Image (spheres, rainbow, N blue to C red):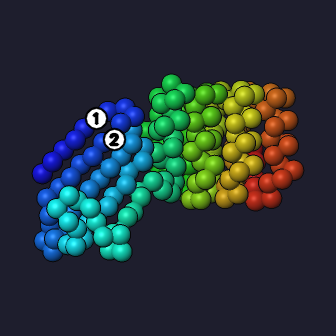
Amino acid sequence: MMFFFVFRRELLELKTAHFLGGEEITIKSWGKRNIKIRRASPFSDDQGEVDPDRDVEKESQYDQFGKALYLSACQSLGVVPVSYFLRNINETKMNLAHHGIGTTGAKAISISLMSNTKILELDLSDNWLEGKGGEHVAYLLAENLFITDLNVSNNHIGSRGIEAICRMLLSNTTLKRIN
């Protein structure tokens, strides 16, 4: 078994021994984001080169519910991730009332939920989102056409947030209820 670990923007490679049937799994990653898994067939030569006709490659980059995207957004924005959000991101109802999310937290959540197809009801009440947070939620709902129920009450979003949400409502046809 061979391990190569080089951090930051250099190649990170993990090689394992041959499995039953002659398969070998190689995991390669640039930085910490893209992971490519390659299964080498028994027709590989000694240098690890693989017959291109028999090589199977899978990239495990798909983040169905936005969990990895949320963690990445939190890290880049300097926000502590909400564990409840991570535990329930694949549920149909997300109740984040009274979590103290704030403006920056709303941005991280909005980024991750733009492509989420599971959450139908989103409760962000009493989180001090303010105007900018209201804008982030409006951007989220302009992109996400699966959320049908939204609660943003008691967030002090003011006219700035309300205007953004009103503009979003001109194009979003799936939102059925907003509080």
Name the one closer to the observer, 124 or 57. 57
Q: Is residue 118 above or below residue 96?
A: below
| Residues at circles 1 and 2 in contact by the CB criterion of under 8 Å | yes
Three-letter amino acid code of the residue under disc 1: Val
Q: How far from the left and from the top, in percent, is residue 37?
A: 33, 58
- The amino acid type, in three-letter code, at marker 2 is Leu
x and y percent of residue 129 in the render? 67, 29
Q: Is residue 64 visible?
A: yes
Q: Which of the 4 quarters of the picture holds residue 49?
A: bottom left
| 102 shown above or below 142 | above
x, y (%) of residue 121?
63, 53
- Give the CA separation, mark 1 to mark 2: 6 Å
* Any part of residue 176 in sight: no
Q: Residue at left 17%, top 55%?
A: 16
Q: Which residue is the site of mark 1?
A: 6
Q: Which mark is residue 54?
A: none
Q: Residue at x 16, y 71 (%)?
A: 22
Position of the C terminus, as image quadrant, is: top right
Q: How many marks?
A: 2
Query: Residue sitting at 47 percent across and 47 percent down?
Result: 67
Left or right, 169 with reference to 94: right
Ranked by sequence position, the earlier of labels 1 and 2 is: 1
Q: Which residue is mark 2?
A: 11
Q: For numbered disc 2, what is the local secondary structure?
A: strand
**Is 66 above or below relative to 154?**
below
Q: Nearer the viewer, residue 2 or 147?
A: 2
Q: Nearer the viewer, residue 93 or 142?
A: 142
Disc 1: CA contacts within 10 A as few (<14), some (14-19) or many (>=20): few
Q: Is residue 127 left or right of residue 43?
A: right
Expressed as whole percent of the image width and height from the top left, the position of residue 150 reads 69, 48
Query: What residue is shown at x 37% (from left), y 64% (from top)?
Result: 57
